[in-house]
Image (tube, rainbow, N blue to C red):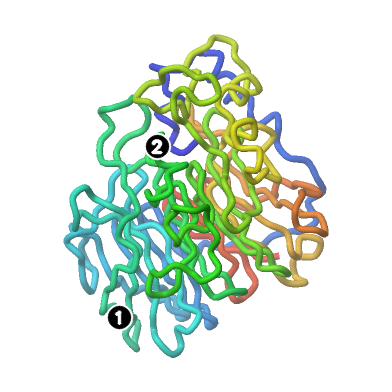
Amino acid sequence: MSQRSFNACLPQLVSAAVCALALSAPALAQNGANTTSLKHSVVLSDLDNPWDMAFLPDGTMFFSEKCKGLSVRLPSGKVNALLGMSKSKGYASTANDLFCEGQAGMNGVAVDPEFAKNRRIYVYSTSNMSSPQTNRVMRLEVNNDFTGVSNRTDIVSDIPYKVAASDHPFGGPGAHNGGRLRFNPGDGFLYVTTGDNHNSRVPQSPTIMGSKVLRIDTDGKAAPGNTPPSGFDPRTYTYGHRNVQGIAFHPKTNTPVVAEHGPWHSDEITVLKNGGNGGWDPRPNMAGRGACPGDYCGYSPNQGEGMNRAARAAFMPMTDLKTYPDAMVPIWDNNGWSQGTASATFLNGKQWGDWDGALVVGLMGIGFGGTAFGQRIDVIQLADDGASVAGVTKMTLPMEAGRFRSLVQGPDGSLYAAIDEGTIHKLTP
């Protein structure tokens, strides 16, 4: 689910049968031999919703906390708080326009491939500099001793933000916010993931920069070679997404792969195609649907006693191949479950054994009555063509699972995992 606990399974909207289906999700845990034994250590604790991480070659780690700001952990273990939100304390500087609300705040972080020369990093954050508020991609320069940042430039300033929740019953302000930033080592461009804001017009819109994966240069301009349909904003690499919070690049081909939150069903892993349509279209009157709450059919049918996942998926598909037969077909749908697949990275190195080259995704789980189900890391091994799944393994963890918000492989070859509950972990084979 894309909201924390999805409001305890939205009891005011959902039947007991639907919640019971959610609670049965662990029975579909992925199968496969766990070939890797992991060592574990806590890198940082007592954080406030750590959202993302980005590394320098020497192990320096930039990390964001959704409602506090951007910090850096040096190889010595020392932490410097660099840029805070408007009300944050203890940071070298604060930005009065930055704020957090719901899923929105300071989200993705990426390091410039030329950092050694230009000292640049990039941060995705919510800003009230304009009205209505928007999500922005900020370019910052880090000083030589890693104690502060300067020369902020907002290279993207028009990613939509969900301001109000009064027009429909789902989620709240800041929902379906996207927010991941990653540089593709193959083409050198910055990829930006955005969400649909619970606005049914956004996914298939050619000009609204939600529900998209943007591919841009370090000044925010469209990457040459983007091929969106005629009339689309040229920064668009793919469109028609719901809420992408994970993107990674195949270690052999550098092909982008995304992880995306499903509605009542079907988290998706999709190999992107330049100009491709993700096939998400929650507008009323599409595929025979009638009126929906707030003109957003993304959770319809809302009640339907006894309706199973297959029926819901047929009514409101994540990838609507009937309407969009040329849409990108996902390679994995989490066995038809929606459990908050949020982050993704590829494992690289012989130390990972059979998992070398595998995609790992972090699942935040479904919340119900204060208890979470389905929180885990899945290891997804792709076929040789990189376009299909050969096997999925639930990673055996040497620690308690949590809401896995970010997975990043560090320069030491270990897997770093940030969880919403406030810790960043290091997993080493």
In this orientation, which residue lies closer to the viewer: 285 or 191?
Answer: 285
- Between the C-alphas of marks 1 and 2, the distance is 43 Å
Which secondary structure, mark 2? loop
Q: Residue at x 42, y 60 (%)?
A: 108
Q: Residue at x 34, y 58 (%)?
A: 106
Residue 425: percent from the left, percent from the top?
53, 60
Q: Quadrant of residue 47?
A: bottom left
Q: Quadrant of the C terminus?
A: bottom right
Q: Nearer the viewer, mark 1 or mark 2?
A: 2
Kindly identify the amino acid type of the residue bearing the numbered disc 2: Arg
Q: Is residue 422 left or right of residue 322?
A: left
In this orientation, which residue lies closer to the viewer: 156 or 395?
Answer: 156
Q: Is 179 placed above or below 92 here?
A: above
Q: Is 312 placed above or below 392 here?
A: above
**Would you call the spot at circle 1 few (<14 residues within 10 Å), some (14-19), or many (20 or more)?**
some
Q: Quadrant of residue 110?
A: bottom left
* Mark toward the start of the polypeptide (1 vs 2): 1
Q: Residue at x 50, y 19 (%)?
A: 289
Circles 1 and 2, Cβ within 8 Å, touching? The answer is no
Give the residue number, with chain letter if any, for mark 1: 147
Q: Is residue 94 left or right of residue 351?
A: left
Kindly identify the amino acid type of the residue bearing the numbered disc 1: Thr
Query: Which disc, if any, is residue 334?
Result: none
Which secondary structure, mark 1? loop
Give the residue number, with chain letter if any, for mark 2: 201
Q: Is 83 placed above or below 248 here?
A: below
